[in-house]
């Protein structure tokens, strides 16, 4: 197979960045910052950044394959004004962006989660709007575009008391992104845009990483391992599955850790060492060290303890 050469420079491993990140140092200048949330395959990010070489762009996206396609597109320009992170935008805004530093935030076609039972996953809650407001400079802009009219209504209901003034417009397909093309091909011709302008600052502080404790227990019986799901004060941890390598004496526990709407799939390793069974996060997991992840480690520890009393 012929390798496809791309520059990996625009991709930042968020685990190695300071919180908040020093964007002037990363870009080597103090140009204005624009953030794109959920850039997908990067059509808009690549085009906009090429049109505005005097602006720096930060993209948050959750899926690796979409980030790879975006890196290919970015490789076709000689510009150095884009950085992309595989990160939930909620964590990105909470931890990596200082208050009053972002000129604009754009989000094209956020998942509308149309079912009522899925509404908890929607991004632009009043809390997230306040967070975005706090990171925008005075007069900064948040642009949200969707194909889903009820979603716009839901966002509008969340705007009061978030410090934004708002302008609503029906628009035609204008962005040429993968998802927009899909809906145009399906016959949709009308789309919806909200332009939110920051009018009053909402103070939302930076969120710090949680310390990740490493646990050790003398005994562990994989056959009797029973994980108790946890849910309290917006923190939830649920068990997915466990693999056990009896030869190497290593278990890999897969759990879902949720801090409010922010969900992370994480892997926790239980491995036999000279000092007993150590319980740690799997290496190389690009997760956010949140309260739910700390709780997940504690839950695995408790379940390991209980497996062999
Ligand atoms: C419907 S797609 C739209 C992608 C692209 N903007 C387009 O127009 O083709 C929504 C994208 O947002 C990303 N996304 C959803 N929630 C996100 C979040 N909380 N943080 C970062 N990205 C998110 C998804 O991974 C997905 O790629």
Image: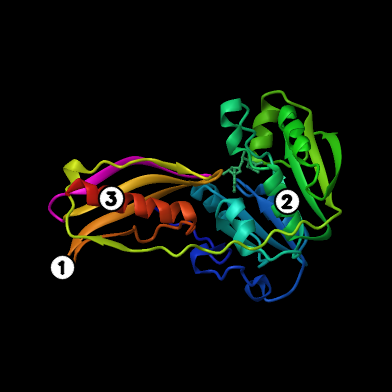
Magenta stretch: give its range.
Answer: 234-248
In x, y percent, where is residue 101? 74, 65
Image point (34%, 57%), residue name: 282
Q: Which mark is residue 252?
A: 3
Label 1 sits on a secondary structure element that is: loop
Q: CA distance from mark 1 to mark 3?
A: 19 Å
* Category of crowding for the residue at label 1, using alpha-carbon neighbours closer than 10 angstroms: few (below 14), some (14–19), many (at least 20): few
* Category of crowding for the residue at label 2, using alpha-carbon neighbours closer than 10 angstroms: few (below 14), some (14–19), many (at least 20): many
Q: Earlier in the sequence, mark 1 or mark 3?
A: 3
* Category of crowding for the residue at label 3, using alpha-carbon neighbours closer than 10 angstroms: few (below 14), some (14–19), many (at least 20): many
The CB of the residue at mark 3 lies under 8 Å from ligand 1: no
Drawn side of residue 291 relative to residue 239, left or right: right
On the image, numbered disc 2 is attached to which residue?
130
Which quarter of the picture shows residue 125? Answer: top right
In the displayed orientation, state which residue is furthest to the top.
Answer: 187
**Front-most of residues 290 and 71:** 290
Establish if 59 lies above or below 13.
Answer: above
- Let me know if residue 239 is in the magenta part: yes
Label 2 sits on a secondary structure element that is: helix
Q: Earlier in the sequence, mark 3 or mark 2?
A: 2
Image point (75%, 34%), residue name: 152
Q: Which mark is residue 262?
A: none
């Amino acid at each position: 197979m012929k390798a496809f050469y791309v520059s990996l420079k625009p991709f930042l491993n968020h685990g190695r960045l300071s919180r908040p990140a020093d964007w002037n140092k990363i870009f080597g200048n103090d140009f204005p910052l624009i953030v794109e949330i959920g850039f997908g395959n990067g059509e808009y990010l690549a085009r906009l950044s090429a049109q505005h070489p005097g602006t720096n762009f930060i993209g948050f996206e959750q899926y690796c394959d979409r980030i790879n396609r975006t890196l290919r597109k970015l490789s076709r320009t000689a510009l150095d004004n884009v950085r992309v992170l595989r990160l939930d935008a909620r964590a990105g805004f909470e931890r990596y962006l200082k208050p009053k530093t972002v000129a604009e935030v754009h989000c094209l076609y956020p998942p509308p989660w149309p079912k009522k039972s899925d509404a908890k996953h929607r991004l632009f809650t009043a809390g997230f709007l306040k967070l975005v407001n706090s990171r925008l400079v005075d007069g900064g802009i948040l642009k949200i575009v969707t194909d889903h009219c009820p979603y716009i209504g839901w966002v509008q209901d969340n705007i009061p008391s978030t410090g934004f003034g708002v302008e609503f417009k029906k628009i035609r397909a204008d962005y040429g992104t993968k998802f927009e093309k899909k809906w145009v091909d399906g016959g949709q011709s009308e789309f919806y845009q909200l332009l939110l302008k920051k009018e009053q600052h909402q103070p939302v502080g930076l969120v710090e990483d949680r310390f990740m404790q490493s646990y050790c227990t003398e005994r562990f019986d994989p056959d009797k391992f029973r994980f108790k799901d946890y849910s309290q004060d917006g923190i939830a941890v649920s068990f997915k599955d466990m693999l056990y390598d009896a030869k190497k004496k290593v278990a890999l526990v897969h759990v879902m850790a949720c801090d409010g709407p922010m969900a992370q799939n994480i892997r926790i390793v239980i491995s036999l060492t000279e000092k007993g069974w150590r319980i740690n996060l799997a290496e190389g997991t690009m997760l956010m060290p949140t309260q739910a992840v700390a709780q997940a480690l504690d839950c695995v520890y408790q379940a390991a303890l209980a497996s062999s009393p």
